[in-house]
């Protein structure tokens, strides 16, 4: 929309060449000032609330000034349409309607002063174009807000899903560890006890197979215990991935995420609370 405004102002500037030479410098200076105010309003960050408001007020005054200098070529009408499109972004509907009515009243009085034919009809035409511009900007803003809301909801779902998936993996890992401990570990311990009993029998004590079976069972039990310990050592829920998933669809503000290696959260409820904060 900023490009459309710049193109419109360029077209208005081309129309100034038809002005009489005595008013051309003043009209060109007023249009240049209007263009600067428009660029400030369009390109300044939304946090620059006061400068943008001042630019909007200056644009309104400059549009009326051009209407005074060039009452017959439609310059002021076009600039007022651009002004309404800009004002729709920051003014409430009540203030927008009041300011638009005041500006059009001023334009009407200028047309009467310059003895322009059918000034009331011209004002009605202006109001029609201004209403169209304001409604287009209004619905474009609503569509943008809806898109941002949908992006936030989608990011929330993605982040929550990442936490739930991580929590489910932890729960499954602990379940498998318990199964290995309760089944394989107990049976291997029982086998070691039986092999020890066989090794104490004088008739079998000298058998190499008994010694090898004892050694293998001991090593296998140690290996299972190591695996169980590794499975029980929870690394915590992956908050970093969840937070990045939450911030990924949002264009602003930019996310600079730094989480120390030793920080971990094991409780899914705590992780979800941190994520929502």
Image: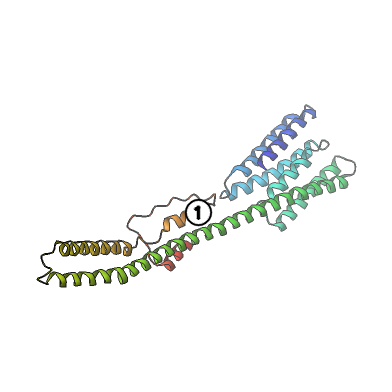
Protein image colouring: rainbow
* Residue appearing at x 63%, y 49% in the figure: 53
* Residue appearing at x 82%, y 43% in the figure: 110
Q: Where is 228 relative to 240, above or below?
A: below
* Residue appearing at x 33%, y 55% in the figure: 261
Q: How many marks?
A: 1
The image position of residue 28, as x and y in percent, is 71, 32
Residue farthest top in this picture: 21
Residue farthest right in this picture: 117
The image position of residue 207, as x and y in percent, is 13, 64
Which sits in the foreground, 107 or 195? Answer: 195
Determine which quarter of the picture holds residue 15.
top right
Relative placement, left or right, of 32 versus 132 is: left
- For mark 1, does the 10 Å Cα neighbourhood hold few (<14), some (14 to 19), or many (20 or more) residues? some
Which sits in the foreground, 119 or 79? Answer: 79
The image position of residue 236, as x and y in percent, is 37, 62
Q: Is residue 218 visible?
A: yes
Determine which quarter of the picture holds residue 23.
top right
Residue farthest front in this picture: 203
Relative placement, left or right, of 156 versus 103 is: left
Q: In which quarter of the image is the N terminus?
A: top right
Q: Can residue 23 be seen in this view?
A: no
Determine which quarter of the picture holds residue 166.
bottom left
Which sits in the foreground, 260 or 135? Answer: 260
Q: Is mark 1 on a helix, strand or loop?
A: helix
Residue named by callout 1: 247
The image position of residue 43, as x and y in percent, is 60, 42
Relative placement, left or right, of 104 versus 252 is: right
């Amino acid at each position: 929309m900023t490009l459309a405004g710049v193109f419109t102002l360029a077209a208005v500037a081309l129309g100034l060449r038809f002005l009489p030479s005595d008013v051309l410098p003043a009209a060109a200076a007023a249009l240049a000032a209007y263009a600067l105010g428009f660029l400030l309003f369009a390109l300044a960050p939304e946090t620059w609330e006061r400068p943008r408001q001042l630019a909007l007020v200056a644009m309104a005054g400059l549009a009326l000034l051009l209407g005074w200098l060039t009452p017959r070529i439609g310059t002021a009408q076009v600039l007022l349409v651009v002004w309404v499109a800009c004002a729709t972004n920051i003014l409430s509907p009540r203030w927008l309607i009041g300011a638009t009515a005041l500006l059009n009243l001023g334009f009407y009085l200028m047309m009467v002063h310059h003895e322009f034919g059918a000034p009331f009809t011209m004002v009605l035409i202006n109001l029609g174009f201004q209403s169209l511009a304001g409604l287009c900007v209004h619905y474009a803003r609503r569509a943008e807000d809806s898109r941002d809301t949908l992006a936030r909801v989608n990011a929330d779902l993605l982040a929550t899903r990442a936490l739930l998936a991580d929590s489910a993996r932890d729960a499954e890992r602990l379940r498998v560890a318990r199964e290995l401990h309760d089944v394989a570990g107990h049976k291997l311990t029982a086998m070691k006890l039986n092999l020890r009993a066989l090794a104490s029998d004088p008739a079998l004590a000298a058998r190499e197979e008994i010694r090898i079976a004892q050694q293998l069972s001991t090593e296998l039990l140690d290996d299972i215990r190591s695996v169980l310990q590794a499975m029980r050592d929870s690394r915590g829920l992956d908050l970093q991935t969840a937070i990045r998933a939450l911030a990924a669809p949002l264009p602003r503000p930019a996310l600079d995420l730094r989480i120390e290696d030793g920080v971990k959260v094991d409780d899914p409820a705590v992780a979800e609370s941190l994520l929502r904060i």
